Image: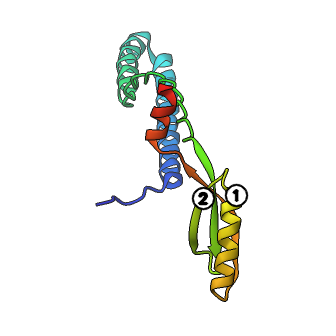
Amino acid sequence: MAGRVLNRRELRRQNDAAESVERDEAEEEADVEEDDDEEGEEDGAEAAEESDAEEGDEEEAPAKPKAKKAKAPPKPRKPRKPKAAPRMRARWGVFDVSMKQVALFDYKDRAAADAKVAELAAKKNGTFFLQVVKEPMPDDAEAAAAGK
């Protein structure tokens, strides 16, 4: 469960008010001690000892914030090695008007692809066209090419 959100400005005002009250009290005590010093030095010595003890308490009273451990600087990230793009091969695709692939030919077989387009156009009443299709090369072809 989430706690109530603290109003930092209000807390700051309260803290400043408390500090001003403490300063006023310290000034009044200092005035009283000066008056005591004028009455007698013996009383002043005792008052000085008491004021030293009170000052020590005042110094210890505010809680000292705990020293935070210094965080180690973040380690620089090593850039990832970019993956090599897969090898692509171009092929001729025969498509109809609805972009449905009807046939696929190797790039060097452009004449066969044109013949297929003409055959389909004569056989069926529709429009067919050629378009270059790029697809990743199969792993077997890479292994065979590397072995040669």
**How busy is the neighbourhood of tag 1: few (under 14 within 10 Å), some, or many (20 plus)?**
some
Specify the label residue 18 is tagged with.
none
From the viewer's perspective, is 5 left or right of 130? left
Q: Is residue 28 visible?
A: no
Q: Specify the amino acid type for callout 1.
A: Arg
Q: Are marks 2 and 1 in contact (CB under 8 Å)?
A: yes
Residue 39 percent across, percent down from the top left: 46, 18
The residue tagged 2 is 105
Secondary structure type for disc 1:
helix
From the viewer's perspective, is 62 left or right of 88? left
**How busy is the neighbourhood of tag 2: few (under 14 within 10 Å), some, or many (20 plus)?**
some
First of labels 2, 1 by sequence position: 2
Q: Residue furthest left?
A: 1
In this view, the residue in front, 26 or 81, is 81
In this view, the residue in front, 6 or 68, is 68
Residue 51 percent across, percent down from the top left: 40, 20
Secondary structure type for disc 2:
strand
Q: Specify the amino acid type for callout 2.
A: Phe
Residue 139 percent across, percent down from the top left: 45, 40
Q: Residue at x 49, y 36 (%)?
A: 142
Q: Residue furthest bottom?
A: 125
Residue 36 percent across, percent down from the top left: 45, 21
The residue tagged 1 is 110
Identify whether 64 is placed above or below 103. above
